[in-house]
Image (cartoon, grey):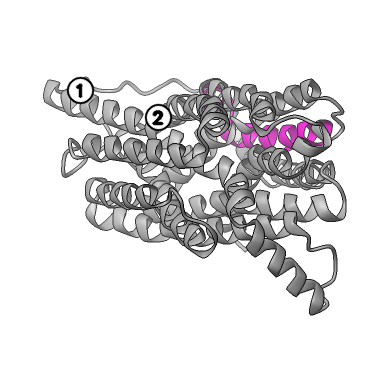
């Protein structure tokens, strides 16, 4: 494997681990801690909220450090720091301790998106497809968080769901630092060099870029609410609506002699994994379409898909609920690379990490704010009302995206 392919593989694995770390607690809270610690699902969600605020708040400083020091160096810090903080979180014995651990995980996890995505869009051609492939890895991390955590809960306890990925991330971080050491040193020399002057931007181009930026950051915030509400809550949604199906599959697997404990937690995690994994493939189609036809039409299609499936989800159970969940997750995952594609096209290479940093401050602040929304709506009305709220949010996105220009200007 040549150096470029190895580097892209490292970045993809980083995206996988980033989303895995941030969603381990979602399954742990839904399937075991609410019973083990005697707290409601809504009460436990409160302890995850500061971690998601850190996930957003520290994105811009991470991008700034990457531009001023080294993007490769920051990626090594991401791998090792996330791993160490995950292991520490696994030792928590109170809700406050686990909340502090999730906050520290959020600080290190914040590094990936402004730094890793800036590297993907700067270094390789076919930006849409590269972002899509990278996005699939990230979404498989979302999917694996539910699957692996559910399996480990049944077979080794919830603490192992933090310990094992933490050790893996540290090992990968050391390997990344060794493999990219020449580039880390080169980044430091490049930062010390005299910056190149940039020509002033024409007024009409400034106006177009301002319009695109407003739409990008607005849709980023609303899309993040949808993404967080679906990915974080789906294990709990399936726990409520597919529990009978999960029990039947568990008995069948036990009857056919599948090794290990395949209790309901494992089956709920498996169902969530299937939905997340299949839905993540939508990004490949979206990435190809972005390179061919641009973001406006693609964004309108995925927004429409979400409106339809969120609207029909209330009241569904068993197989129909599973099918509708797959439909709205296809839209939720499909929209992920679109804003990143637009930033990559209109931001200059020198400032891309900071531009992505701002994008993810907005995104992950919205993610954090969504957790109290999930808790409040679930405690008072249940998930049917949440799905109606998300359908309205997707409609707002569709209206905003219709204002995008049909063709993006090149980076200034």
Q: Is residue 43 visible?
A: yes
- Which residue in the structure is indicated by mark 2? 221
Q: Report the front residue among 228 and 324.
A: 324
Q: Where in the figure is residue 172, as x and y percent of width and height?
A: 74, 47
- Residue 179 as seen in the image, left or right of residue 260: left
User: What span is colored magenta in the figure?
Assistant: 62-88
Q: Where in the figure is residue 107, as x and y percent of width and height?
A: 65, 25
Look at the numbered disc 2 and give the secondary structure of its residue: helix
Counting residues from the start of the chain, the first of labels 1 and 2 encountered is 1
Main SS, magenta region, reads helix
Q: Is residue 125 visible?
A: no
Q: Is residue 148 above or below residue 411?
A: below
User: Residue 68 colored magenta?
Assistant: yes
Mark 1 touching mark 2, by CB under 8 A? Answer: no
Q: Report the front residue among 325 and 398.
A: 325
Disc 1 crowd rating (10 Å Cα; few below 14, some 14-19, many 20+) is few
Query: What residue sits 84% from the left and 71% below the top?
Result: 259
The CA distance from mark 1 to mark 2 is 27 Å
Q: Where in the figure is residue 125, as x and y percent of width and height?
A: 38, 53
Disc 2 crowd rating (10 Å Cα; few below 14, some 14-19, many 20+) is many
Image quarter where the C terminus lies is top left
Q: Outermost residue, left direction? A: 204
- Which residue in the structure is indicated by mark 1? 201
Q: Report the front residue among 133 and 160.
A: 160
Q: Is residue 257 above or below residue 342?
A: below
Q: Where in the figure is residue 268, as x and y percent of width and height?
A: 66, 56
Q: Is residue 175 above or below residue 69?
A: below
User: Residue 49 colored magenta?
Assistant: no
Query: What residue sits 80% from the left and 23% below the top?
Result: 97
Q: Is residue 105 above or below residue 304?
A: above
Query: Residue 355, labelled with which disc?
Result: none
Q: Nearer the viewer, mark 1 or mark 2?
A: 2
């Amino acid at each position: 494997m040549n150096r470029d392919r190895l580097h892209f593989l490292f970045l993809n694995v980083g995206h996988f681990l980033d989303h895995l770390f941030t969603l381990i607690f979602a399954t742990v809270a839904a399937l075991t801690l609410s019973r083990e610690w005697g707290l409601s699902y809504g009460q436990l969600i409160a302890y995850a909220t500061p971690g998601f605020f850190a996930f957003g708040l520290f994105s811009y400083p991470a991008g700034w450090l990457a531009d001023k020091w080294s993007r490769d160096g920051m990626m090594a810090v991401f791998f090792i720091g996330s791993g160490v903080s995950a292991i520490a979180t696994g030792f928590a014995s109170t809700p406050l301790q686990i909340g502090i651990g999730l906050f520290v995980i959020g600080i290190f996890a914040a590094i990936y998106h402004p730094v890793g995505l800036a590297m993907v869009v700067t270094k390789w051609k076919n930006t849409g497809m590269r972002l899509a492939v990278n996005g699939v890895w990230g979404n498989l991390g979302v999917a694996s968080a539910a699957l692996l955590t559910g399996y480990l809960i049944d077979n080794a306890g919830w603490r192992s769901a933090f310990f094992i990925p933490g050790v893996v991330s540290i090992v990968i971080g050391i390997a990344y630092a060794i493999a990219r050491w020449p580039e880390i040193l080169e980044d430091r020399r490049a930062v010390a060099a005299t910056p190149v002057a940039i020509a002033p931007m024409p007024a009409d181009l400034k106006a177009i870029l301002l319009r695109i930026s407003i739409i990008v950051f607005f849709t980023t915030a609303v899309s993040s609410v949808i993404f967080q509400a679906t990915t974080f809550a789906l294990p709990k949604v399936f726990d409520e609506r597919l529990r009978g199906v999960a029990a039947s599959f568990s008995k069948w697997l036990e009857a056919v002699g599948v090794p290990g404990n395949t209790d309901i937690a494992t089956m709920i995690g498996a169902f969530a994994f299937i939905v997340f994994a299949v839905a993540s493939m939508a990004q490949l189609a979206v990435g190809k379409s972005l390179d061919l036809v641009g973001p406006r039409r693609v964004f309108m299609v995925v927004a429409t898909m979400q409106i339809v499936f969120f609207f029909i989800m209330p009241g569904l159970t068993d197989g129909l609920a599973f099918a509708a969940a797959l439909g709205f997750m296809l839209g939720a995952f499909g929209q992920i690379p679109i804003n990143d594609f637009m930033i990559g096209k209109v931001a200059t290479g020198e400032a891309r990490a900071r531009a992505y940093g701002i994008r993810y401050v907005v995104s992950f602040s919205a993610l954090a704010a969504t957790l109290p929304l999930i808790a409040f709506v679930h405690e008072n009305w249940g998930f049917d009302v949440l799905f109606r709220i998300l359908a309205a949010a997707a409609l707002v996105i569709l209206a905003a995206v219709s204002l995008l220009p049909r063709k993006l200007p090149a980076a200034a």
